[in-house]
Image (cartoon, grey):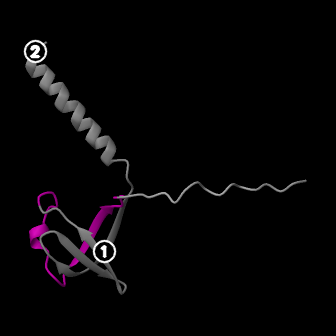
Amino acid sequence: MNPKIVCFLTAAILTLNTSVFAAAGKTYQITGTIVAATGTTLAVEKGGERYEFAIDPATIKGSAELKVGSTVTVTYVMSATKIESSGAPAAATSPTP
């Protein structure tokens, strides 16, 4: 088989797999005022509550222009980094007739 075709098919499969996994999470939005911004973090305040986000400047468009006091809308996805189980769930009891 032609090596160019193999490379193209591999790239296409990897791209499709990535888009399928990325689309699995529900996205959320929050609009608020920037209270802190560094190269890798962003803190937004809305209604007296502070929300902190980890950001990747290489993938977040406009991250270099984040200024304290500006109003922004952040679109994000919740994802778990670790899950620990505390054991088996309690057995459900059914009423006896």
* Residue at 30% in and 74% down: 31
Determine whether 78 is above or below 43 in the image: above
Residue flagged by tag 1: what amino acid is it? Thr
Question: Mark 2 = which residue?
Answer: 2
**Which numbered circle lies on residue 57?**
none
Determine whether 46 is above or below 11 in the image: below
Outermost residue on the top side: it is 1
Outermost residue on the right side: it is 97
Judging depth in this view, the residue of 35 and 31 nearest the camera is: 35
Judging depth in this view, the residue of 37 and 69 nearest the camera is: 37
Dividing the picture into quadrants, the one containing residue 93 is bottom right
Q: Is residue 35 magenta?
A: no
Give neighbour class at mark 2: few <14, some 14-19, many 20+ (Cα, 10 Å).
few
**Which numbered circle lies on residue 31?**
1
Q: Is residue 3 left or right of residue 74?
A: left
How many numbered marks, from 0 up? 2
Dividing the picture into quadrants, the one containing residue 67 is bottom left
In what element is the residue under mark 1?
strand
Residue flagged by tag 2: what amino acid is it? Asn
Name the spot of residue 97 as percent of width and height, x first.
Answer: 91, 53
Determine whether 17 is above or below 61 in the image: above
Per the rendered image, the range of residues in magenta is: 58-81
Name the spot of residue 64 as percent of width and height, x first.
Answer: 9, 69
Q: Quadrant of the N terminus?
A: top left
Name the spot of residue 62 as percent of width and height, x first.
Answer: 12, 66
In what element is the residue under mark 2?
loop
